[in-house]
Amino acid sequence: MKNNAITFVRTLMLLFAGALMGIWFSNENLRGNRFFLSGGDKLQRVVKLVHDRYVDSVDIDSLEGKSVNQLLQDLDPHSLYLPPQRAQSINERLDGGFFGVGVEYLMLDDTLYVSQVLPGGPAAKAGIESGDRVIRFNDHNLAGAHLTTGKIDSIFRGGKNTDVQLSVLGPNSSKIKVVKLKRDRVDLSSIDAAYMIAPATGYVKVSKFAATTDRDFKAALKKLKAAGMQKLVLDLRDNGGGYLSAATAMADEFLPAGKLIMFTKGVHEPRTDYFATDSGLFEKGKLAVMINEYSASASEILAGALQDLDRATIVGRRSFGKGLVQEQFPFADGSAVNLTIARYYTPSGRSIQKSYKDGADSYHNELAARMQKGELFSEKSNLDDSLFKQPAKYHTANGRKVFSGGGIMPDVFVPADTTGNTELLYSLSNRQLFMGFVLQKLQAKLAKYRSFDDFSKGFAVNDAMFTDFVVYATKTLKQLDSGQIRQSEKKMCLYIKAFAARFKWGDDGYFKTINESDITLKTAIKCANE
């Protein structure tokens, strides 16, 4: 059955490629009553029939995409059709960079603000700074509500060595400076933060497993070891995965040569084993790994290997539960199909893929079901799940019981901290009002801080600043619920400070600030030091 299904998919993929060309063929053979939906060309013929005879105008590309995606989703929730823009976005994210100017931005009051300048990019080399306002691009004004994200991205991104001229106003300045530069490669690091978080203890947050993750992670390890790191806390929370090879390469940094990291297999993919080599940079120090319900795929490969081999203490909450491996098949128009070709298994032989027998919608709502059952707040609620009441089948190298079929269950459970979480807090974050407030209201206050330590000790969100923020937010959200303001006040103050730190010191500054009150992180530090 499975063999037939996959063969059918591959056949339809070829038919879909043919349909892209076939819609331009003559429609003579469709006139009268002689049209037959016959043989193996049904998809191509139906698309052509809709194109030539449907009562209204139809976007054929969109129709084909939806049809193919529905077919793939009926197989499993991770086999997907990707339209060109989405395929490009995903590939850029995992390729570890793009060609462009190298800035992040916000549109505030019809003005384009630079919120971050990416290190090593053309903008950084040309002297553009966070907080600058870009008012012209070449001969075009950059102002007004007509500027969409897509239009701005097309300005800041482009081919290698293409010319860009920006007219820029510095913070609190009325003097325009003209900056000429060429678009070039801008690297996007997989490492959000890497710093010493406690005596002899390093902290590394990995946001994704991309083409450059192995290089980025090795650089972070070397920096921390030079600073005296003997123990490590690795943060994989909210890391949705990426390349399998990046996950196995990171596992190799922690494991001695010859240890099985994982293996993959599928009907058309023979078993492939992945072993550690003898080149690991951190094979002996104490290690704690943090995961949560949004840690998926490659994150689970790494956490599962380190748990099965008793190399690390896994801290946090049960991971997502994705144990399927996809391969991307591109089309000429830039779209692509991500097709599941294999399952992966941890060293003990377990598959952590959760069930998708009830369909894609049920699968994607599974996290909400977990929350309703209280799994994010109680270890007992997790263990009461039927998944974890099965007879002991899988064990770590030292004989500890581990579970399959529903993600990685941590060794040390830490409940989710939802204190202060409200719909208002979500709206403020979603509208990027914390960074907007920093850009428009706090730049002058932040100018005096020369180091993060001075900022961390000296900057505080007092009552007056908090009131200013609430007033600022009402210009966008109009009405703010007073009860939710009181409930979220502590977190709102934390986010104001964290985004102020990001403005001055990038992601390192942001996570250093956010992590100060992180209960899961404090637990992980304790585990790494036991």
Image (cartoon, rainbow, N blue to C red):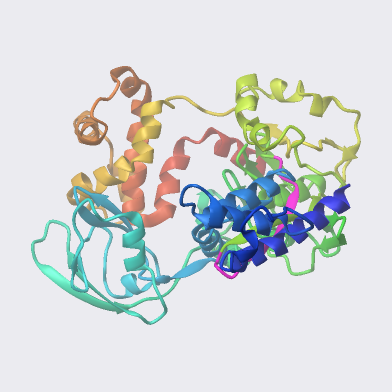
Task: Indicate whether 412 appears above or below 252.
Answer: above
In terms of depth relative to the viewer, which is nearer, 504 or 420? Answer: 420
Task: Please give left or right for residue 521 compared with residue 499 in the image.
Answer: right
328 with respect to 456 (left or right): right
* Residue 162 sits above or below residue 313 on the image: below
Location of residue 377 (image quadrant): top right
Number of numbered discs on residues: 0
Q: Which residues are magenta?
A: 321-334
- In this view, the residue farthest toward the top is 483
Where does residue 384 sit, x and y in percent of width and height?
A: 76, 20
Q: Is residue 326 magenta?
A: yes
> In the visual, does 401 lie left or right of 516?
right
Query: Could one spot residue 309 in this view of the protein?
Result: yes
Q: Is residue 162 magenta?
A: no
The residue closer to the viewer here, 251 or 476, is 476
- At x 42% / y 79%, what residue is drawn? 160
- Residue 383 figure quarter: top right
Q: Position of residue 189 (x, y in %)?
A: 51, 63
For residue 424, side relative to residue 108 (left or right): right
Q: Residue furthest left?
A: 174
Residue 162 image point, x, y percent: 35, 80
Quadrant location of the C terminus in the rendered image:
top right
Which residue is at 32% across, 17% downward?
483
Viewer-closest of 31 and 441: 31
